[in-house]
Image: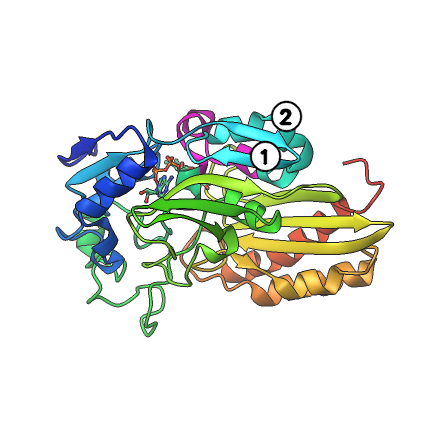
Amino acid sequence: MLRLPRFRMEIPATAPEAAAMLRALGAHEEDPATLGTPRLHVMAVAGGTDVYPNMKRRQFTPETLVSLRRALSAEIGVNGEARIGGGATLAAVAEHPGLRARYRALAMAAELVSTPQLRNMGTIGGNLCLDTRCNWYDESLFWRTAEGYCMKTHPSVVCRVATSSPRCLAVASADTVPALIALGAQARVVSEDGERLVPVADLYRDDGMRYLAIRGDEIVTAVLLPKADGWRSTYLKLRDRGSFDFPIVGLAAAVKWDGGRVADARVALTAVASRPILVEAAGAALAGTALEEDAVAAAAEACFKAARPMDNTSGTIAQRKRTVSVFAGRALRELRQGDPS
Ligand SMILES: Cc1cc2nc3c(=O)[nH]c(=O)nc-3n(C[C@H](O)[C@H](O)[C@H](O)COP(=O)(O)OP(=O)(O)OC[C@H]3O[C@@H](n4cnc5c(N)ncnc54)[C@H](O)[C@@H]3O)c2cc1C
C-alpha cells in the first residue's frame, strides 16, 4: 500500500485568506522545476483526487497543504451567463440542468472524468489546475528511482520522452478545459494582489513542468461562461477503458448559429500536447459556412495539424493524431442545425 508522506494541513475560511496563506508560505516563489524536491513547501488542495495520489507516489511532497474546501464556493448559477464556484464538484457540473441545456460540452466533459466517487470529490478548480501527466512521471517512487527519474521531478535529468527536448513534454489531460475554452470561459483568479479574470485559453503554458500561467499563490475562485444564445457544443473523448480513464484525446467543439450560417466557432483539444490547444484555424474554416462537408474537412485537417501527441500516454502517436481529425468531423456533424442530438 502506498502511504501519504507527513504534511501539515491549513484550512482557511475564505479565498483571500487562503491566498494570503499560500503567499506567506512561499507558494508564489515555488519554481515548478523543483517539484518533488524538498524545496516545494506548500500547495493548494481542493478535492485532492490528484494531489493525494501524486503525494503517495512522491511526485511532490509539500510540507503544508492549504485546503480550499471551506474557502471556495460550490454554487452554480445559470441566468443568461453562468457562474460556477471553483469548489463545485464535477458531479454537480455534470448534473446541473442549466449547464446540460446550455453548455452541453462542459457537462459532457465533466461527466466523462474518471469515476462517480472521484467526480463527487474532484472540483472544477482542481480540474483547471490539474498537473500534467506522463508515463515517465505518473509512476511509483520505486519505479521512478529504478529508472533514474525524469526532467519533471529532477530538472538535471533529460526528458525521457524525447531526450533532446529542452523542456518537459508531459501532457495536459484535463477533460473540462477544452470544453471551457470552446465555450469562451474565463477564470476568476484571486491572490493577495486582488482579483483578475483570465480567459481559460490563457491559463496554460506549453511546458509540462511549468504548465500553469498563474502563480502558486493564485486561486481559481470561479469559472464564468458567457451567454450561450445560439451556441451548440459537444465533447468527445478517447480513453483506454470506457468505464474510467484520463483522455488520450479530448476534443470540444462549439458553434454559434445565426440564420443558418455559422457566426462563430471554436474547436479545442486536450491530451495531445503539454497545453490545451485552441485550434484557431478550425474556427476560421467554419465561420460563415453551414458546416458543409468541405468546411468540416478543412476544420478536421486544421485540428490534425495542431495536435502534437508524443509517445508518453496510452495509444500511439498516429492513432491519436488520426482520432483528432475523426473526432472533429463527428463533433461538427453533430452540431449541424436540425440534428436531433
Ligand atoms: C483514477 C483517476 C482517474 C482520473 N481520471 C480523470 C479524467 O478522466 N479526466 C480528468 O480531467 N481528470 C481525471 N482525474 C484527475 C482528477 O480527479 C480531476 O482532474 C479532478 O477534477 C481534480 O480536482 P480536485 O479538486 O480533486 O483537484 P486537487 O487534486 O485538489 O488539485 C489538483 C491541482 O489543482 C490545484 N488546485 C486545486 N484547486 C485549485 C483552485 N481552486 N485554484 C488553484 N489551484 C487549484 C492543486 O494545487 C493541484 O495542483 C483522475 C484521477 C484519478 C485518481
Q: Earlier in the sequence, mark 1 or mark 2?
A: 2
SS state under label 2: helix
Quick check: is the Cβ at mark 2 less than 8 Å away from ligand 1? no
Magenta-colored span:
109-124
Whether 99 is drawn above or below 315: the answer is: above
Quarter of the picture holding the N terminus: top left
Asked if residue 99 can be seen in this view, the reply is: yes
Q: Nearer the viewer, residue 13 or 66?
A: 13
Quadrant for ligand 1?
Answer: top left
Residue at 43% across, 36% down = 86
Q: Position of residue 174 (x, y in %)?
A: 46, 45
Whether 306 is drawn above or below 182: the answer is: below
Magenta highlight: main SS: helix
Residue at 45% across, 58% down = 275
Mark 2 nearby-residue class (10 Å; few <14, some 14–19, many ≥20): some
Amino acid found under the numbered disc labelled 2? Pro
Q: Position of residue 150 (x, y in %)?
A: 25, 60
- Residue position for label 1: 107
| Tag of residue 99 | none
Q: Quadrant of residue 211?
A: bottom left
Q: Position of residue 144 (x, y in %)?
A: 22, 52
- Residue position for label 2: 97
